[in-house]
Amino acid sequence: MALLLQSPVARIRRIVGRPLGLPSPLAGRTVLVTGASSGIGEATALAVGRAGATVLLVARRADELDRVRRAIEDAGGRAAAYSCDLTDGDAVDALVARALEEHGAVDYLVNNAGRSIRRSLELTQDRFHDFERTMAINYFGPVRLTMGLLPAMRAQGFGHVVNVLSWGVQMKAPKFSAYLASKSALDTWSRIAGRETYGDGVTFTNIRFSLIRTAMSAPTEAYAGRGASPERAAARVLRALEDRPVTVKHPRRRRRRAGQHPGAARQRLAVPPLRQDVPRLRGGPGQLDLGPITRNVIPLGSAIEASRPKGESSAGITCEPPSSTAVAIAASVSGTWT
């Protein structure tokens, strides 16, 4: 029951605790952050250090890790740096063993390290290694690291894993097949893992970020000057660590006119008008136009009834035969395809 109330209790604690100066739930905990040498990882490590946690910094570039470690320590925090290539399975296993030996169980894990590739399928025809490289760092690396740290988390009855993903997992953007396939794999794996470890006090959060201004997005000219800052992204990671929600999705921007009811725009977008080829039922002196699509207006049975030849309606209503599109729409609304 306590774990069920974790997120709402954390929100209340944040609202009440700030004026009272209460410490963050991360204070005194051990947090491992991958990809901590730059971008979202660096900003997250600095934020976690300010929250009072011991930060374990993981990335390939040892010199950059030392720079981040010094910045955390200069601000009064505690940090340790571990240079590791997360695509090397043996190196990941050695990292897990060293971290557990030196710090005991890792309380929080942020799987942030990753690689993005923006390339169409046509240009990827002879580049199968694009898929292998993205799966290696975006999926196999974090899964192996998480699996290595899970036994200690479950043994102590506490642990939380935050995965830095992309909102492309929701929208399936073209030219990102290799990148989004690997991120989707980690998204799905973590949702399943979270269900299996929930009873042991270990939870998972998948954060689906939109564009963030980092070195990873810099090579794409179309993204120049666009996206949120790494610091803003790190603030959301920090909140996910404290609140432990299941998913943090890309926030939707809603525009509405002055004086308009908040739900009006949403209803207008969610209920589009029917095309002209959708059947109309006629009965008596008037004409009944089915109007917009809703779950209650066009049940599957009505579509089947409307598909009878003209003059054969068992309900005494003459019908114009519908198009195949109309039948398919009605079937999908009722949850069944014909």
Image (cartoon, grey):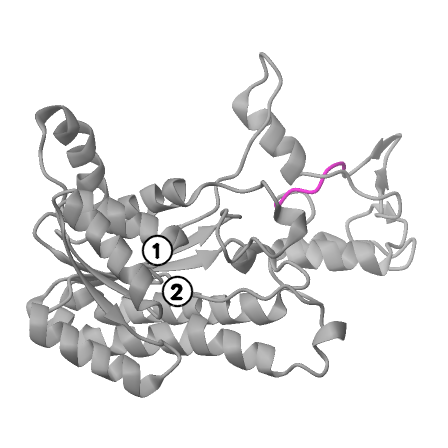
Disc 1 target residue: 41
How far across and down, in percent of the image, does residue 311 sit? 91, 53
Identify the residue shown where x is 48% and y is 66%: 183
Disc 2 target residue: 113
Badge 2: residue crowd in 10 Å (few <14, some 14–19, many ≥20): many
Question: Is 7 on the left-hand or right-hand side of 98?
Answer: right
- Choose top left, top right, bottom left or bottom right for residue 92: bottom left
Identify the residue shown where x is 24% and y is 83%: 93
Question: In front: 270, or 216?
Answer: 216
| The residue positioned farthest toward the bottom in the image shown | 90
| SS category of the residue bearing label 1 | helix
What distance separates the C-alpha of mark 2 from that of mark 1? 7 Å
How far across and down, in percent of the image, does residue 78 sit? 12, 53
Badge 1: residue crowd in 10 Å (few <14, some 14–19, many ≥20): many
For the residues bearing labels 2 and 1, Cβ distance under 8 angstroms: yes
**What is the magenta range?**
291-295
Amino acid type, residue under disc 1 in the picture: Gly
Identify the residue shown where x is 53% and y is 23%: 262
Judged by its main secondary structure, the magenta piece is: loop
Q: Where does the C terminus fall, quadrant-wise? A: bottom right
| The residue positioned farthest toward the front in the image shown | 63
How far across and down, in percent of the image, does residue 272 sit? 72, 39
Question: In front: 17, or 189?
Answer: 17
Image mark count = 2
Q: Is residue 152 above or below residue 265?
A: below
Q: Is residue 212 visible?
A: yes
